[in-house]
């Protein structure tokens, strides 16, 4: 399941649309693979101290210690 948690404050981002989409898609696909195609994926976007923060969280098993 995908859960979107979006800030109600509008913000301007100076990035090409296709680059922004590719970054979000890559993060989401990595999460989906880490969860073995099942679980919860959280995408949060908020404005804090003038910065736009994008957080990606999943409940996958994570990276093996040998690969960290």
Image: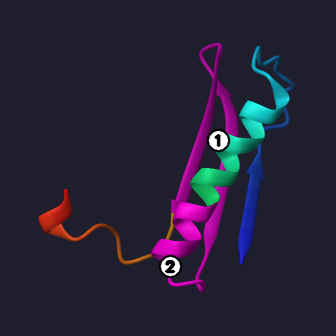
Residue, disc 1: 23
Q: Is residue 40 above or below residue 28?
A: below
Residue 59 showing in the rendered view:
no
Residue 32: where, in percent of width, then height?
A: 58, 72
Along the line of sight, the residue nearer the viewer: 46 or 43:
43
Which corner quadrant of the image does residue 28 belong to? bottom right
The region drawn magenta spans: 29-57
Mark identifier at residue 60: none
Q: Give left or right: position of 43 versus 63.
A: right
For residue 1: magenta?
no
Along the line of sight, the residue nearer the viewer: 18 or 47:
18
Q: Residue at x 34, y 69 (%)?
A: 62
Instruction: Give me the C-alpha separation between circle 2 and circle 1.
Output: 19 Å
Q: Secondary structure at mark 2?
A: loop
User: For mark 2, does the 10 Å Cα neighbourhood hold few (<14), some (14 to 19), or many (20 or more) residues?
Assistant: some
Q: Secondary structure at mark 1?
A: helix
Residue 48 showing in the rendered view:
yes
Q: Give left or right: position of 46 versus 55.
A: right
Residue, disc 2: 35
Q: Is residue 18 above or below residue 55?
A: above
Residue 60: where, in percent of width, then height?
A: 44, 76
Which is closer to the viewer, label 2 or label 1? 1
User: For mark 1, does the 10 Å Cα neighbourhood hold few (<14), some (14 to 19), or many (20 or more) residues?
Assistant: few
Mark 2 or 1, nearer chain start: 1
């Amino acid at each position: 399941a995908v859960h979107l948690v979006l800030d109600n404050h509008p913000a301007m981002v100076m990035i090409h649309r296709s680059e922004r989409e590719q970054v979000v898609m890559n993060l989401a696909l990595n999460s989906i693979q880490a969860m073995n195609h099942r679980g919860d994926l959280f995408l949060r976007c908020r404005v804090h101290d003038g910065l736009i923060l994008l957080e990606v969280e999943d409940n996958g098993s994570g990276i093996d210690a040998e690969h960290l």
